[in-house]
């Protein structure tokens, strides 16, 4: 059990010192997956080659070869990232049997760093959701309460780490899909600056918003993983030519001289008292570490969700047009009733292959991009998005970090919001802005509700200033870090 709750850094160091073999560590996680995945449904596919990868690391260690900074660390990968010769579904029927011929840059860099791929984690279909209930492969569950959602869309990635089914995981964040499940499951999750991590080989949802990032048990672990996956990639023209700092070696818990902004729009009456209490405790901790807190304002917060759902669905409508049943992916059975024309071929294939939430977002996006409505919806959303960015830049001239809630409440029950899209969408009120503006954001555990459910605290910083997040996050987690597995899984 100790291995399952060990920090990535400690586990890596023990493997490097050969106090523990990579194969032994991997076996423990695979055993935990076998025992609990039928209940949690955190994984869609388990990698049958994981033990072989671990044994290869052990052989390299025995001969003194360079094994990389994450050597022997068993990790999970969200099923939005292509993995060569390992099924990649994006949680959708239309890709249910797709086995990519190549791996995403993030996966390549993890493997080059010596990490072990345990498998592919469950998610909302095409990352479209906030609860991990829209997957073709079934609902994922929260390890702290099996009747509740783990958040979304990277719910399987968060549940795997929280439940001891992986030492760390990779998620993707388009509107909060790393930070919200991290909050619901009591783990650390960071969405890096847009362009910090390559999107090559990641199944596209909304290309101007998507970013991959780590989900771990500690802030330092997230820094270590981000160091391994970040950096310029010639295969992704949107990656930034920025050096990759050694964030993990520069974490500083002395916050003297740091200003932390508290946006008045983030402290609404909608917040549950327990969520407000968790955020207030985090504020007290950063003040005790020497930081100065200042009130700031982000007036466009109340329409950020509206901007997001116009931009994201428009880009999704374009990106998902490639799933036509011709080149790869699901194709409807036309053997008994042939399609009369190409339009019917597409309609039947896509109608069978996509779930209801994906269809809803494609319809919304197609409408927003259509002739006569483009200027009124998509173009206007892009213009207001620019104004939102200007507001954040103005705020960051007054402070280095913004602190607030991730969500208005802890994890909700499975089925509670799935039939009410508006209520589900409003769940993203505090997270979508970071994606629209392109800034980094982090969720760090801030405490528990009276029902024993984790509550996360959100930290935001200016573009490419992830170090501030790690510094402030390390202060908060010092008192709030969750070191045990949920009682239900022990």
Image (cartoon, grey):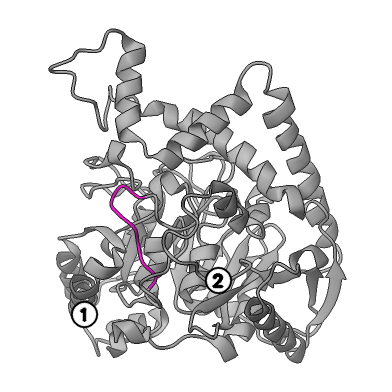
Cα–Cα gap, marks 1 and 2: 30 Å
Location of residue 354 (image quadrant): top left
Mark 2 surroundings within 10 Å by alpha-carbon count, few (fewer than 14), some (14 through 19), many (20 or more):
some
Please give the range of residues in magenta. Answer: 135-142
Q: Residue farthest to the top?
A: 340
Which numbered disc, 1 or 2, marks the residue that appears first in the sequence? 1
Q: Is residue 6 left or right of residue 119?
A: right
For the image shown, how many numbered marks are present on the structure? 2
Quadrant occupied by the C terminus: bottom left
Per the image, the residue denoted by label 1 is 28
Q: Position of residue 345 (x, y in %)?
A: 30, 17
Determine whether the residue tagged by mark 1 lies in a helix, strand or loop: helix
Q: Is residue 305 above or below residue 343?
A: below
Asked whether residue 69 is in view, the answer is no
* Residue at image point 49% right, 32% down: 362
Quadrant occupied by the N terminus: bottom left
Location of residue 405 (image quadrant): bottom right
Determine whether the residue tagged by mark 2 lies in a helix, strand or loop: loop
Instruction: Tell me if residue 397 is in the magenta stretch.
Output: no
Mark 1 surroundings within 10 Å by alpha-carbon count, few (fewer than 14), some (14 through 19), many (20 or more):
some
Q: Position of residue 427 (x, y in %)?
A: 59, 58
Q: Position of residue 438 (x, y in %)?
A: 65, 51
Asked whether residue 400 is in view, the answer is yes
Q: Can you tell which mark lies on residue 246? A: 2
Camera-side residue of 93 and 239: 93
* Residue at image point 64% right, 70% down: 458
Of badges 1 and 2, the one in the foreground is 1
Q: Is residue 462 above or below residue 253?
A: above
Q: Is residue 422 above or below residue 52?
A: above
């Amino acid at each position: 059990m100790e291995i399952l709750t060990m920090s990535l850094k400690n586990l890596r160091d023990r493997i490097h010192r050969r106090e523990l073999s990579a194969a032994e560590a991997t076996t423990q996680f695979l055993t935990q997956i076998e025992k609990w995945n039928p209940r949690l449904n955190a994984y869609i596919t388990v990698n049958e080659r994981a033990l072989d990868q671990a044994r290869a690391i052990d052989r390299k260690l025995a001969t003194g070869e360079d094994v990389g900074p994450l050597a022997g660390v068993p990790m999970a990968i969200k099923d939005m990232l292509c993995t060569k010769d390992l099924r990649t579904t994006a949680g959708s029927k239309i890709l249910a049997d797709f086995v990519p011929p190549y791996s995403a840059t993030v996966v390549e860099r993890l493997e080059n760093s010596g990490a072990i791929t345990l498998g592919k984690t469950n998610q909302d279909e095409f990352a479209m959701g906030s609860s991990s209930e829209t997957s073709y492969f079934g609902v994922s569950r929260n390890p702290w309460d099996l009747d509740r959602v783990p958040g979304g869309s990277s719910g399987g990635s968060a549940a795997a780490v929280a439940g001891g089914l992986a030492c760390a995981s990779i998620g993707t964040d388009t509107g909060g899909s790393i930070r919200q499940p991290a909050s619901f499951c009591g783990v650390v999750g960071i969405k890096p600056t847009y362009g910090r991590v390559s999107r090559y080989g990641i199944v596209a949802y909304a290309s101007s918003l998507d970013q991959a990032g780590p989900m771990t048990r500690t802030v330092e672990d997230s820094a270590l993983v981000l160091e391994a996956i970040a950096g310029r990639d010639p295969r992704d023209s949107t990656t930034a030519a920025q050096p990759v700092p050694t964030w993990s070696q520069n974490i500083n818990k002395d916050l003297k001289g740091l200003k932390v902004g508290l946006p008045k729009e983030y402290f609404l009456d909608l917040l549950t008292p327990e969520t407000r209490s968790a955020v207030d405790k985090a504020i007290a901790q950063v003040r005790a570490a020497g930081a100065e807190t200042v009130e700031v304002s982000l007036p466009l917060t109340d329409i950020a969700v509206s901007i997001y759902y116009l931009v994201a669905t428009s880009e999704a409508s374009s990106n998902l047009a490639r799933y036509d049943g011709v080149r790869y992916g699901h194709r409807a059975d036309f053997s008994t009733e042939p399609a009369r024309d190409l339009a019917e071929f597409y309609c039947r294939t896509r109608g069978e292959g996509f779930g209801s939430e994906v269809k809803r977002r494609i319809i919304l996006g197609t409408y927003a991009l259509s002739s006569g409505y483009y200027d009124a919806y998509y173009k206007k959303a892009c213009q207001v998005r620019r104004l939102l960015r200007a507001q954040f830049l103005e705020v960051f001239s007054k402070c280095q970090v913004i602190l607030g809630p991730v969500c208005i409440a802890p994890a909700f029950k499975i089925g509670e919001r799935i039939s009410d899209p508006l209520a589900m969408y409003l769940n993203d009120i505090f997270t979508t802005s970071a994606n629209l503006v392109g800034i980094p954001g982090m969720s760090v555990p801030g405490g528990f509700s009276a029902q024993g459910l984790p509550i996360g605290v959100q930290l935001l910083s200016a573009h490419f200033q992830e170090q501030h997040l790690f510094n402030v996050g390390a202060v908060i987690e010092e008192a709030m870090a969750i070191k045990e597995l949920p009682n239900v899984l022990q």
